[in-house]
Amino acid sequence: MTRSVLLFAGMAALFVLTGLTQSWSLALTVLNMGVISAIMALGVNMQWGYAGLFNIGVMGFVALGGLGVVLTSTAPVAGAMAAGGWRILLALAVGVLIVLGAVALWRRGGRLRAPAVILVLVAGFFAFRALLDPGVAGVEAINPTVQGNIGGLGLPVLLAWPVGGLLAALAAWGIGKTALGLRSDYLAIATLGIAEIVLAVLRNEEWLARGVKNVIGLPRPVPYEVDLQQSARFTGWMADLGIDPATGASLAVKLGYLGLCGSVLALVMLLAELALHSPWGRMMRAIRDNEIAAGAMGKNVKHQHLKIFIIGSAVIGIAGAMMTTLDGQLTPASYQPLRYTFLVWVMVIVGGSGNNWGAMLGGFLIWWLWVMVEPIGAGVLSAITAPMSDGWLKSHLHDGAAHMRLLTMGVILLLVLRFSPRGLIPER
Amino acid sequence: MDLLNALVAFANFVFVPAMSYGAQLALGALGVTLIYSILRFSNFAHGDTMAFGTMCTILVTWGLQHLGISLGPLPVALLALPAGIALTGVFLLATDKVVYRFYRRTRAAPVVLTMVSLGVMFVMNGLVRFIIGTDSIDFADGARFVVSARDFRTATGLDEGLAIRTTQAITIAVAAVAMVLLFWFLNRTRTGKSMRAFSDNEDLALLSGINPERVVAVTWLIVAALATTAGTLYGLDKSFMPFTYFQLLLPIFAAAVVGGLGSPVGAVAGGFVIAFSEVGVTYAWKKIAGYVLPESMQFSGLGQLLSTDYKFAVSFAILVLVLLFRPTGLFRGKSV
C-alpha cells in the first residue's frame, strides 16, 4: 500500500518537475494525454489482467471511438442523406443480411454448403458494391474540399464519448463472436488484423469521415482560448492572479479538459475496482488462472470472455473518443499500432497487470516517458557529443535522439519483464 | 491473339509481382513458423529482425560499392548478403543469450515470451532507426530489367509488354534456393532431424540426448538467414524503410497463420495465398477483361474489387476467414 502511494507521489512529482523546469502548459498537456492513456490501459487491463485475453487490436477500438466523435458531434452535411446517405445505409443493411444469410446457410450443413456459401458471398459482394458505390459517389461529390462525408448528428460532443464506447463495444461483440474461440496466439494475431481492417476502412471510406483528408475543427466541450481572452471577467481574474491572459486562457482550457477527463478516469477506476473485488471479479480471475477448472465448476467461460472483451473494448473506445475530442481532429493516418497498441501494452505490463492502480500508474508513467525521452535523449546526446569535433558522426548522433524513445520503451519493457514481471504495483 | 495479350497482361501485372511478393512473404513466414515450432512463441520482433538484417546488408553493400566492386548485371547486395546474415546471426544469438534464455530456463508461459519479443521489437526498431535513419534507401544496382516491355513487344509482336525486373527474377530464384536448402536441411541432416524431433516432443527429444541449446542456436541462425534474405530481397525489389518492415510483420503473420503456425510447408503456401489474394483483389482487371470479354460485357469501372489501400486488410480478411473454418490454419499448425 505504502509502495503504491510512494509511486503515485513520485509520478506527481515528475509532472510538477515538468511544470517547474519546462512549462505548466506542457505539463498539463502531457497530464491530459496521461489521463486518457490511463483509461486505455485500464481497458486493456480488464481484458488481459482480469481475463487473460491477449488483445493486440487496441488501435482499432481507439480509432472507432474517434469515429464516434465525428458521427455524433459534427454538423450534418446538407443534402448528404438525399445525395446517397440513405442508399449507403441500405447497402450496409443488405451487407449485414448477406453475411447473416451466409452464416445461416453454413449452419444448415449439407454437402453443398461450401460452394453455396461462397456463391452467396461473391454474388452478395457485387450486389453490395452495386448498391453502395453510387451512394458513395453522391455523398463524396458534395463540396469535397471541406465535406464530402455524411457528417454527424450535431449532438453535444460529450455525448460522443459514450457513443464512441458503444461503437467499440459493437465491434468487440462481432470480433469476440468470431475470434474468441481461437487459442491465445491466434486470437492475438486475429485482433491485430481486425484493427488493421478497421483502420483501412477509416482511411479509405471518405463518405464516412473524410478518410485521410481528416476531419478538423471538431466541437469542444470547453471554451475557446480566444473567447476567454476577450471576456472581461476572465481577463479580470487573470489580472488579479497576476497571470498573462494568453497563458491563463491556455491553462484554463487545459484544466477544463483535465476536469472532464479526470472525472471519466475516476468513474472508470471506481467501477473497475468494484467489479474486480466483487464475486464476478473473482470468477474472472479464476477463469484466467484455470479455464478448465472454472468450466468444470459450471462457469460459462466463453460467455464471460465475450463479456469482458466487450467491456474492456468499450472503455478503450471511450478513451479513443476523448482523445479525438482533446485533439479537436480525427486523423486516421496517425493511428499506428506502435503507438496505440504496443505502447498501451507497455503501460499495462510496466504498471502491473491485474491491478487497476498499476495499470493507471503505467499509463501516466509511460506516457510521460514517451514525451520526455526525446528531449532528455537529445540533452544526453549533446552532453556526450560536446567534446567531439563537428562532423558526420556528431550530427548523426544528434539526429538519432529522435529515435531514442522506441529504444528506451523496449529496454524498460524488457527490464520490467525480467526483474519485476508482475509490474510496479503487482496484483494482490 | 487477344487471349495471348490477356495472358501477358495477367503475367505482367498480377503473376510476376505476386510471385516475387509471395516469395518474400514465404521466407518471412518460414522464420516466424520456425520460431513458433521450436522456441514456442510468436515472435513479434521478426519484422524488425528483417529490417536489422537488411540494414547490415546495406552497410556492407555500401562498403563494397565504395571499394568499386560490382557484380555486373546483378546487385552488389547479393555479395553482401552472407555478411549481413552473419552479423544478424550474431545479434540474434546475443539477444537469445541476454533476453530469451532466462525465460526458457524458467519455463515461462508462451505468452510471456511473446511480450518479451515485443520489447525486443521496440529495441531493434529503435536501433535500426538510430543507425540508419528513417529515410527510404534504394540500394539496388546492376541491370534494371531481365526482360523489358519494349523488347518483349518487338520480339513477340503482341500489344501487351511483359516486364520482369532483375530484382523480381532474383527474388524468385534466391527464395527457391533458400527453401530447397531449408527443406533439405530439416529432412535430411542430423541437426535438422533433431530440430524436428525437438519441435514435435520436447521431452522425448531431451531424453534421446538432443542438446536443446544447440537446437535453439541453430534455429536462431537459420532464422537470421531467412529474415535477412527476405528483408534484403524485399528492399531490393521495393526500397528499404524501417517503418515498412514493421508493417510487413502483419502480412507475414497472416501468411504463417493461414498456413498453420509451426508448419514450414504451410508458411510457404500461406505466403503465396496472401500475396496472390492481395494483388488479385486490388488489381484493376479492366485491361484484361478488355481482351477476353465480348464488347457487351465490358466493365464500366476499373474492375477493381477494392482500392489498393486495402492491401493489408485483404490479407487479414483472408486470415480471419481461414481461422474461422480451420482454427489452426490450412496445414493444421499447432498451438502452444
Image (cartoon, coloured by chain):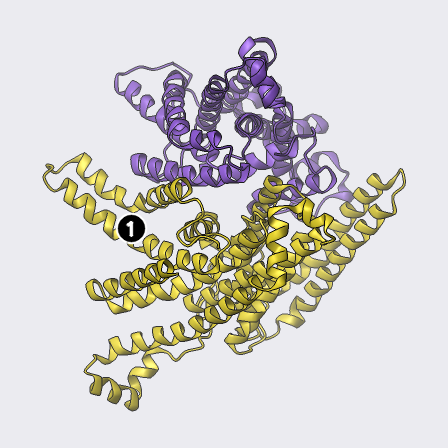
Chain colours: A yellow, B purple
Q: Position of A339 compared to B207: left or right?
A: left
Q: Residue at x 24, y 89 (%)?
A: A236
- Residue B9 visible in the picture: no
Question: SS of the residue at dot 1?
Answer: helix
In the displayed structure, B63 sits above or below A159; it is: above
Q: Chain of mark 1?
A: A
Give how far across and how far down residue A39 sits, in percent. Answer: 47, 62
- Asked whether B207 or A337 is in front, the reply is B207
- Residue B329 visible in the picture: yes
**Residue type, mark 1 in image:** Val
Q: Position of B242 compared to A85: left or right?
A: left
Snapshot quadrant of residue A170 = bottom right
Give how far across and how far down residue A88 sits, in percent. Answer: 68, 63
Q: Position of A247 compared to A125: left or right?
A: left
- Asked whether A178 or A335 is in front, the reply is A178
**How many marks overall?**
1
- Asked whether B294 or A329 is in front, the reply is A329
Give how far across and how far down residue A151 sits, in percent. Answer: 57, 70
**Which residue extends farthest top?**
B189
What is the crowding at mark 1: few (fewer than 14 residues within 10 Å), some, or many (at least 20)? many
Give how far across and how far down residue A356 sits, in percent. Answer: 48, 60
Residue linked to disc 1: A373
Q: Quadrant of the N terminus of chain A?
A: bottom left
Snapshot quadrant of residue A135 = bottom right
Q: Residue at x 61, y 34 (%)?
A: B336
